[in-house]
Image (tube, helix red, strand yellow):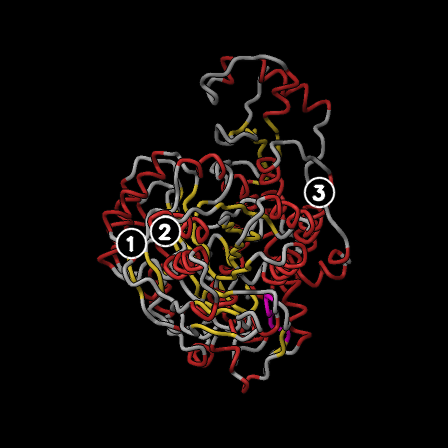
Amino acid sequence: MNILLTTLNAKYIHSSLALRYLRAYGRTKGQAYDIVEYTINMPVLSILADITEYRPDVVGFACYIWNIDMTLHVASLIKEVAPKTRIVLGGPEVSYTAETVMAEHPYVDYIVQGEGEEAFTALTQALQDGRTAEDITIVGVLGRTEDGRLVGSRDIAEVADLSTIPFPYDESDMNELTHKIMYYESSRGCPFSCQYCLSGNRNTVRFFPLQRTLQELQWFVDHEVKQIKFVDRTFNCAPHHHIPIMEWIHAADTATNFHLEMEAVLMGDREVELLSTAPKGRMQIEVGVQSTHEPTLAAICRHNDWSHIQSVIRPIIAAGRTHVHMDLIIGLPHEDYERFGQSFDDLFSLQPHALQLGFLKLLRGSGVSRMDAYDYRYDPKAPYEVLATHVLPYENIRFLKHFEDVFERFYNSERLRRTFTYVGQAILQRGESAFRYFEDMTREWLAAGNDKRKLNDRDQLAFLHNFFKKRHDTIAMELLGVDTLYAYKGRLRDEAIGLPPPRKEALKASEAFWRDEASVRRYIPEYSFNEWRRIRHTYAEVTLQRETAKILGVDSTTPTVMLIIDVEERVAPFVRPEVS
């Protein structure tokens, strides 16, 4: 029997951990599965053609909010061209609504609800044994009989002993996933009951064995994996488990980056110490605060201690060793436009490296999807995004979508980190609202019609330069130029972004300096003069005011200063001396 496991990833760089778990567990029971992954950006008929080349007897799809509609489309086409193929769905998008999905889509033969390793393997064994849906009784598996009746289990499957699930990766994956994100988990479940999330439905946590976890992390390090993204819903929910893992990551001799989803309320001194002293770039954390409004938090069964959150996050950000990503959700109960602005300002005051604004998704099976009192209006198609609430009309949601787009383009852009670190600090020093600042930026963006045009990088940077110019913020304008030089390696220069081509007089003076190797080696020890054109491309000269130069680490006694910028960031900016 040919069994194919597949999914439609959101992007090419993503990979499926779930499929590899199924494959690894199936092998322990004598089952063999092929894996093939696609993306939602591929043509449906191309996916169909590729799947049918495998001539599968069973096709198992991993279903999520980003792929469910397209997955069902592909599944229906498989049934059209190969009616004897059994279609099996699994994943969070179908686990809590299995009966509804099967009733609405008669081409689906089975749905595996919950964790699939044991349930899916038992199902494929039963099918290989020639058993029909009437004869299959497996926890978590709902099936369809020949006459269309739904039979089987309505329960959510859960693997009691995670140690029975093998490590999901093997050597073959290293070739396929070289340029993709690799996912990993050391635990399953969540101790919280947040009503917007499916992980809160069971309120339990199970752990993979600690020593095994450390050995598997070493396997990733030995294979020089660029990034490991932990998918543990609350990585730091049990100190006996997560502290040794963090200590191991902290001490590892590796360039691998480890992404952890952490709950700030549960963080203590040891976590703060590890994150504040780790090798730079070793760890990055994602912290979901969602709201700072107490009535909102009570409605979604979430507890935040804002004073504690501030006390643990501030020193981590100040240490500059760990990238901190924080989350807010738009559309939660009781949070209107103004109150959301306050939650935004609260989180912005911590100056996280990234502040992600997400829109509430009324996931099927989540608690919030049953909260009729809040008059939710939302898209009935996945990802079920909120359109309006009892306190947040659609007009506000529409504007906040543009706000999120502008904020993501600029503040969350790693390319403009110097600029927006300064902007954020200046806003806070003036005691102003960051929400109002980016609200004004969004209104200017819309007034320029930028939401209706496809802009290139130059256009976006020109808009930002003009926005700063209208506010007479010379430092922001100059830092934007510096960030642009670094981000584009000096290739993007334009008057509209404050980077005019150098004048002949400046080039002449500059050439005299670069030809004097002894002078240059005071700043670039291994320098030797080669092609003049290459030097002009590698080093840029910019005139900055004293305050801007100081931010870049250069002190000056004059109001303005000429700095040389190494666009490849091998040496720090320095003042070009006069050469006679």
**Where does the image place residue 170, in percent across and percent down from the top left?**
39, 39
Which residue position is annotated with label 2? 25
In this rendering, position of residue 334 left or right of residue 210: right
Question: Does the magenta run of residues contain 19?
Answer: no
Q: Secondary structure at mark 3?
A: helix
How far across and how far down the image is residue 395, in percent? Answer: 69, 74
Front residue of 209/469: it is 209
Over which residues does the magenta segment extend? 382-387
What is the number of the mark on residue 164? 1
Residue at left 40%, top 77%? 301
Q: Identify the disc placed on residue 458.
A: 3
Q: Are marks 1 and 2 in contact (CB under 8 Å)?
A: yes
Among numbered discs 1 and 3, the one appearing first in the sequence? 1
| Residue 435 versus residue 554 in the image, above or below | below
Query: How many neighbours does mark 1 have within 10 angstroms: few (below 14), some (14-19), or many (20 or more)?
Result: few
Q: Secondary structure at mark 1?
A: helix
